[in-house]
Amino acid sequence: MIRVIGVGDNVIDRYRHRGVMYPGGNSLNFAVYAKKLGHQAAYMGVIADDRYAEVITRPLRELRIDYSHCEFVHGATGLSTTTIENGDRTITDDNDYGAVKATPLHLTEDRLNYIATFDLAHSSCFSFIEDQLHRITERGVPLVYDFSDEWNERDFDALCPAIGIAFFSGKKLPIPELKRLLERAVHLGCGLAVTTIGKQGALVFNGRKFYQSAPYNLDAAVVDTLGAGDSFLTGFLTTYMEGRKRFAASAGGGDPSAHTSADDRDRYDDALMEYAMQAGNLLAINNCMFYGAFGYGVGL
């Protein structure tokens, strides 16, 4: 078990065609998925005081995810709308991300001290705290940043030196181009770089080797792919980080390189990487079997 925290966005996903709305957001999803996997999880973000706030906070309370360090503001919760037309899903941003963008989270010393107690932190491009990300990594906490599909290569140049792990949607780019981008992210300072590539699964680069894993193909069971990327990332990263933590503990909490050969460390990391990617695939396909990012739907 590890301790993880989602730092950033929350949103209400409204399904007009079903008359239901669901809580979501990359960082909120990360905290919820990690908690469901049995890890200690917390969420820190901006929570507005409108009628949608209860939809966001209810699952946090029921799952016992600490959100006491959130910033509570007067404003609007971010709203998106999903519609289905001729079998195609369209998602719109309806109020410019609400209070999360209008009044971005301020990482005070108290909040940073709290984040420093975790093994892994998560933020995203929808959190609007890019100018503060370096303050998290400076506390020694590994930080994964989700570029989603809202990125260009200049974003990598600007942000990869300030984060530990880069995650982005492959935008249907060819594998050689994705490998080049993953290499660039690591060259800029990331320890890991991860991209999802739709039905081809995911691709990871750790500076030494590329790893690719196809997703589980259970099309008949899939009802909603919302949150599939977030759930893959959470399953993969929590499994991988927990494995690395166990490996370090096996060396008495010291430097594993003092007790194991480079070949042994590489073999362990290879096996752990493959296992972690399958854990991510399993959580992702399970998450596609119900509506919303993680359920908890209420009527519009």
Image: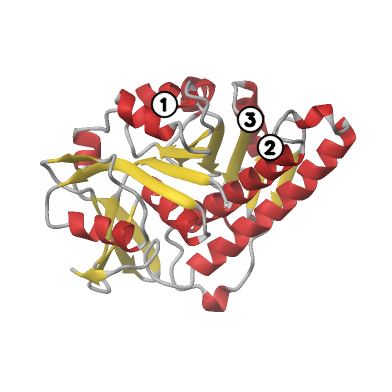
Q: Quadrant of the C terminus?
A: bottom left
**Position in image of residue 241 (x %, y %):** 62, 43
Residue 245 in view, yes or no: yes
Q: Is residue 169 left or right of residue 264?
A: left
| Front tag of 3 and 2 | 3
Q: Is mark 1 on a helix, strand or loop?
A: helix
- Tell me the residue at 34%/49% (across/down): 66
Residue under numbered circle 1: 133
Q: Badges 1 and 2: C-beta atoms under 8 Å apart?
A: no
Q: How far apart are marks 1 and 2 (CA)?
A: 22 Å
Along the polypeptide, which appears first: circle 1 or circle 2? Answer: 1
| Towards the viewer: 71 or 258 | 258
Residue type at numbered disc 1: Leu
Residue 175 in view, yes or no: no
Residue under numbered circle 3: 191
State the image quarter where residue 52 is shown.
Answer: bottom left
- Name the mark on residue 205: 2
| Front tag of 1 and 2 | 1
- Name the mark on residue 100: none
**Position in image of residue 195 (x %, y %):** 58, 43
Residue type at numbered disc 3: Gly
Tell me if mark 1 has few (under 14), some (14-19) or many (20+) residues whose alpha carbon lies within 10 angstroms of its own: some
- Tell me the residue at 77%/32% (across/down): 256
Residue type at numbered disc 2: Phe
Q: Is mark 3 on a helix, strand or loop?
A: loop
